[in-house]
């Protein structure tokens, strides 16, 4: 009976290790601790983001300074490129990973992001902020 348990358990450990190693290999290395190569100010106001399109270079660490001068709302940057399938790994990495950053009225929030994979990544408001909430969209484009 002991052998029946040991063989499947060993196989599961080997598969888990192989899977974890494969995930690590897909991630492009970058310096999360170094200073950003570029800074961009992103403003959320009147149900719009400004700018609506941000370009960064692949592998480049960028600091977004996000502000919402007239109301409290949220920002979600999709880490998967537009049109991604279930098998697509994330192409954006955040130094302090969050799903939805809360932007308090009048405050500026720094968000560090690295674009590892070229593509277009959509950002949206992730807090119900009013009747035109769903119109708040923008694109972060990672260029090769």
Image (cartoon, rainbow, N blue to C red):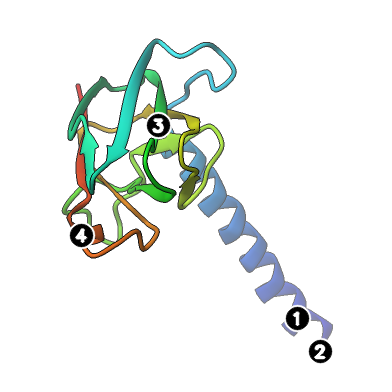
Using the rendered view, name the quadrant where residue 128 is placed.
bottom left
| Residue 13 point in image, percent of width and height | 66, 61
Mark 4 or mark 1: which is in front? 4
Q: Nearer the viewer, residue 9 or 136?
A: 136
Query: On the image, numbered disc 1 is attached to which residue?
Result: 5
Is label 3 or label 2 in front? 3
20 vs 36, left or right, is right
The answer to whether residue 121 is visible is no
Earlier-in-chain disc, 3 versus 2: 2
Q: What is the CA distance from the residue labelled 3 to the residue labelled 4?
A: 19 Å
Q: Nearer the viewer, mark 2 or mark 1?
A: 1
Kindly check if marks 3 and 2 are in contact, taking CB atoms under 8 A apart as contact: no
* Apparent side of residue 133 relative to residue 1 in the rendered image (left or right): left
**Mark found first going from the N terminus, 3 or 4:** 3
- Residue positioned most to the front: 70
Quarter of the image holding residue 91? top left
Residue 1 image label: 2
Query: Dot 2 surroundings within 10 Å: few (below 14), some, or many (20 or more)?
Result: few
Distance in Å between CA atoms under marks 1 and 3: 53 Å
Q: Which is more toward the observer, 46 or 83? A: 46
Task: Report the residue marked by disc 4.
Answer: 132
User: Helix, strand, or loop for circle 3?
Assistant: strand
Q: Is residue 73 above or below residue 13?
A: above
Does label 4 or label 2 sit earlier along the sequence?
2
* Label 4 residue SS: loop
Specify whether 127 is left or right of 121. Answer: right
Label 1: which secondary element: helix
CA distance separating discs 2 and 1: 7 Å
* Circle 2: element type: loop
Q: Are marks 2 and 1 in contact (CB under 8 Å)?
A: yes
Cα distance in 3D space between marks 3 and 2: 60 Å
Does 129 appear above or below 58? below
């Amino acid at each position: 009976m002991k052998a029946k348990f040991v063989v499947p358990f060993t196989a599961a450990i080997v598969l888990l290790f192989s899977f974890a190693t494969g995930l690590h290999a897909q991630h492009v290395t970058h310096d999360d601790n170094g200073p950003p190569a570029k800074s961009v100010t992103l403003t959320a106001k009147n149900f719009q983001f400004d700018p609506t399109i941000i370009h960064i270079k692949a592998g480049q660490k960028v600091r977004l300074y996000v502000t919402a001068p007239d109301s409290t709302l949220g920002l979600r940057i999709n880490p998967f490129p537009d049109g991604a399938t279930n098998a697509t790994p994330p192409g954006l990495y955040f130094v302090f990973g969050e799903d939805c950053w809360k932007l308090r009225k009048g405050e500026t929030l720094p968000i560090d992001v690295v674009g590892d994979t070229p593509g277009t990544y959509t950002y949206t408001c992730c807090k119900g902020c009013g009747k035109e909430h769903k119109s708040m969209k923008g694109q972060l484009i990672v260029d090769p």
